[in-house]
Amino acid sequence: MQEFLQQLANGVAWGSIYALIALGYTMVYGILRLINFAHGDIYMVGAFAAYFLARAMGVGTVVEASPLVAAAVLLGSMVICAALGVLIELFAYRPVRRSSRITALITAIGVSLFLENAGIRIFGADPKFFPQVIAPRTIALAGGVMVTNHQIMVVVVSVLLMVALTLFIQKTRTGKAMRAVAFNRDAASLMGIPVDRIITITFAIGSALAAAAGFLVGLTNPKIEPLMGIMPGVKAFVAAVLGGIGSIPGAVIGGLVMGISEYMVVGYISSTYRDAIAFVILIIVLLIKPTGLLGRNVTEKV
Amino acid sequence: MSLLEVENLNVHYGAIHALKGVSLAAEEGGIVTLVGANGAGKSTTLRAISGLIKPSAGSIRFRGKSLVGVKPHEIVREGVSHVPEGRIVFANLTVLDNLEMGAYLRKDRAGCVEDLKKVFRLFPRLDERRRQAAGTLSGGEQQMLAIGRALMAKPTLLLMDEPSLGLAPILVREIFSVIREIRSQGTTIVLVEQNARLALATADRGYVLETGSVRMSDRAQVLLESPFVQAAYLGGPG
């Protein structure tokens, strides 16, 4: 029982990271019907942006920073990635928006390779040690479960961001406009909604969430390198598909399921199969419920 | 000068020449109707006016200002609203949120509240269902919502594409009485309809479209009595 609860706690923390990344996939898909394969690499850039920001603010590898500096690093990397997401949409995706979906998909793969190789070129291929913005502490919970303060922070920050995102999408005019554009782009533009600007905002928000995930991963797994986005990117994509791509609560549920099942595999089977479980889940979802847990069955109009 | 002047409008969908030099005008405060069979180019004309498709040639002038190449949301800002074919209400949003989206560009909160009341007076059923998701409404209610949503932009010119499509006769009459009501409040209307008899009876002026060209245009009453229109679109003299 203790083992189970321990793996559950680890899985929830790790799943929150997947959920944050999956939100970006699902938002962009919802609005453009585009799988943004570069999204995992934006998360990588987020981790590096946080790395350089923390170093610039004088955080060494052992010296602990104040919570204020930690928050500044987090927000700074979110802003940088939001800008990166906007640029990617403007220069890579907008020119092919009227082209076929396969064109957009290949463009996304191209952007992904570009970011990975630019990362190797600029940051170097060697892993870097993420500064200890917050010193790790271990906390004992009930039932003998041990968690780190980093894991708690991961969950808390993720929940806060998800609540903020949900409120934004449900309550604000811009958020409602995002849902309107996702439902039907032409009808939205006939209401005076500036579709291009809404798409830009969507990319900015999705990329900022990926940056937050990058920062949080830097805290818990302080080894970052330019190809670190590939596997979490793929798994977060699976999480988005599992939850029903286009659905925001679906992305959160999908991310948590992915994280928990990964740690259950580590705990009860073997850590060798840690990455395999994502693809097992993907295959099962595609076979049994291709629209995902919360996905709507969308019939394409001819 | 007419409020809306379309001249020699040409639209291509790839290799298909959908509009071949359509010209029409709408006078301020009137109802103009475009009638014709499926594929005649009625919807295409409206979609070109509201900027959803780019014409290959020709001009569209609204209050003397060219609309060609202007983005759809900017055209809404100019005062042109479009009730699209098939209604396309935002099914995942509530009735109230749909109406709020209609007023997306407006900054005058007081005016919006006033217009919301006006829409609810026009369609009391929408008021009863204001918190309901638009996708759960019946076809007729969705049409009311689509019209109400377009009115929330406070348009000078309202383009309506097949508002009677798929509705029971009693609802069609209700929708058409609302159309007359909207006109009486000073909004100019361009109405696309397959129900030619009802459309011509409601409109001041009519255009008969056939395979992308204007076949006839005249006062609606004249078209209603024309032997050609009667034979081709009204099911014989009647």
Image (tube, helix red, strand yellow):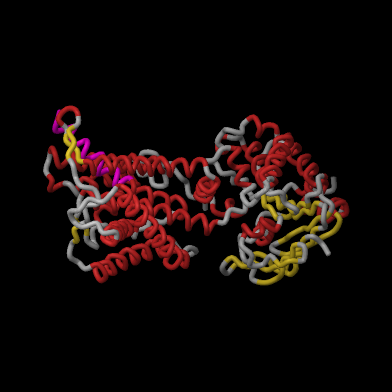
Is residue A16 covered in magenta? yes
Which span of residues is magenta-colored?
Answer: A1-19
Query: Magenta stretch: dominant SS?
Result: helix
To which quarter of the image does residue B179 belong?
Answer: top right
Q: Nearer the viewer, residue A59 or A276?
A: A59
The residue located at (58%, 53%) in the rendering is A193
Q: Nearer the viewer, residue A75 or B214?
A: A75
**Callout count:** 0
Position of the C terminus of chain B, as image quadrant, is: top right
Q: Nearer the viewer, residue A216 or B53?
A: A216
Q: Is residue B88 left or right of residue B174?
A: left
To which quarter of the image does residue A248 belong?
Answer: top left
Can you say whether A13 is above or below A218 in the image?
above
Q: Is residue B59 left or right of residue A215?
A: right
Q: Nearer the viewer, residue B170 or A296?
A: A296
Position of the N terminus of chain B, as image quadrant, is: bottom right
- For the question of whether residue A21 can be seen, the reply is no
To which quarter of the image does residue A149 belong?
Answer: top left
Residue A39 image offset from top left, x and y in percent: 34, 57
Residue A268 image offset from top left, x and y in percent: 13, 37
Residue B55 image offset from top left, x and y in percent: 64, 67
